[in-house]
Image (cartoon, rainbow, N blue to C red):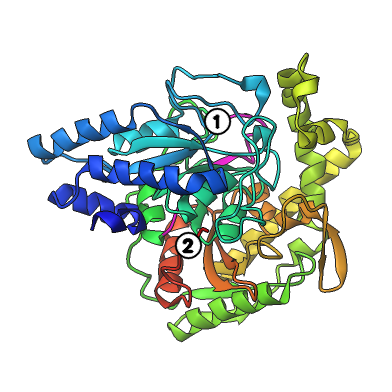
Amino acid sequence: MISEITTFDATRLANLIRSGELSPVEVVQAHLDRIASVDPKINAIVTVADNALAEAKRAEAAVRSTDRLGPLHGVPFTVKDSIDTAGVLTQRGSPIFRGRTPDKDAVSVTRMKGAGGILLAKTNLPEFSYSTETDNLLTGRTNNPWNLQRTPGGSSGGESAAIAARMSPLGLGSDLAISVRGPAAHTGIVALKATHGRIPTTGIWPRVPRRDWHVGPMARTVRDIALSYSILQGPDGVDGYSIVPRAVAAGLGAFPQRQLRVGWLVEPGFGPIDSEIAATVEAAAAALRAEGMVVEAVRVPALERDLPLNIFNKQHVMELKPAFAEATRGHEDEMFSISRAMLATPDTSVADYVLAEQWMEELRDGFAEYFEGYDALILPATPIPAHAHGMSEFVINGQTVPATYIQNATVPFNMTGLPALSMRFGTSSDGLPIGVQIAASWLAESTILNIASVLELVSPVRNLHPTIS
């Protein structure tokens, strides 16, 4: 069993620890050994927590002395390096913050520890979490464990790569436009961006635009996402957007007695989508239909007015620029290229900013109308599978689009605050994971998790792991 430890998901690890079949020390050591073995090729881990084994020994003693164990007791987890961890480096992917060590955990980290989880390590990210690829001047580039010449995405690319490569069973990422769901799709894992405010963002940076930022769990199984979400959700009394009381049933539960109605959508609304991605979305829809749901091809007219990313950029850049300018003042020579480019972006006019705000309200209204008739929406997570490092544009179905286009199917759910989950349901012709995205109405995370659990059971790619050589 020892050799299999890093293949187990967090739920199974917690059960084995609780029953005494595994010790927390064995589990943590197995993951530390895995990091030492494979991370030199992937570069997902930027800091290992010095006290991980000491915490594991304390957790082991607690198993022997009490039966009051948290749901993640003794289970290691990793955290994106933009999320504060007390006493453990949090450098935000930038030489400007080299050596920064917070004295307080982010609330999401506090809650994972409170459930018995053991902080194992911090994971790589683009500078300030601001890119769809994971690279920076401080800790370098992260590679996709399925193909080291491909990106794991961003900005939670280090987290997704670590989990996919079995260096961690689960972890925490953050999401402004794509940042947990895109990396999950690129590396074949599962990630949830819950309804905005469900999980407090206290202790992550940058803080703006906070109406778009989310903290999200990332793991290899849907049940681990459900468990993590049940631990993480609920107000903290600090984040003013986090005001919804903790749900009675936050995770997996019974389906409603009525048939679920699910729409699926590839185009229009997101621009061109690779044919293998489109086929995978349609296959996921067909699988749900075979499981007894009412499944139909749909359109969401509000998505078709303009590409959502075009509108998002007009709004969020103006809100991010002051924070980036303040953080980098006097350190301009230490900035990564993506940060430089963002600060050099022309300001949005007041008129265009107001129009962008109004369009986002129309998009919310459009989704509200859609979810009056359907329980969920199945759509792409990304328009293409994981691409080569450093690309500035893609050609999809004969159309050339900029690399930032990778966010087009995920950003609408940040703009509206709707919950959405990304999970693998296919494989490209060159062996890369293909993800699908499941969205539902506000506060309907349980619907998403239940649908995802059905897809997981019938998935043609269940339990696949990358071979790293």
Question: Would you say residue 131 sits in the magenta stretch?
Answer: no
Q: Secondary structure at mark 2?
A: helix
Report the quarter where the N terminus lies. Answer: bottom left
Q: Residue 204: give its label.
A: 1
What is the span of residues highlighted in magenta in the rendered image?
A: 204-220
At horizontal 80% and vertical 21% (from top left) the residue drawn is 333
Prevailing secondary structure of the magenta residues: loop
Q: Which residue is painted at 50% across and 54% down in the image?
A: 191
Quarter residue 463 falls in: bottom left
Give the residue at x 54% y 83%.
286
Q: Which residue is mark 2?
A: 448
Q: Position of residue 277 (x, y in %)?
A: 66, 72
- Label number found at residue 456: none
Quarter of the view holding residue 11: bottom left
Above or below 450: residue 98? above
Q: Is residue 243 visible?
A: no
Q: Amino acid at mark 2?
A: Ile
Tell which of 237 and 252 is nearer to you: 252
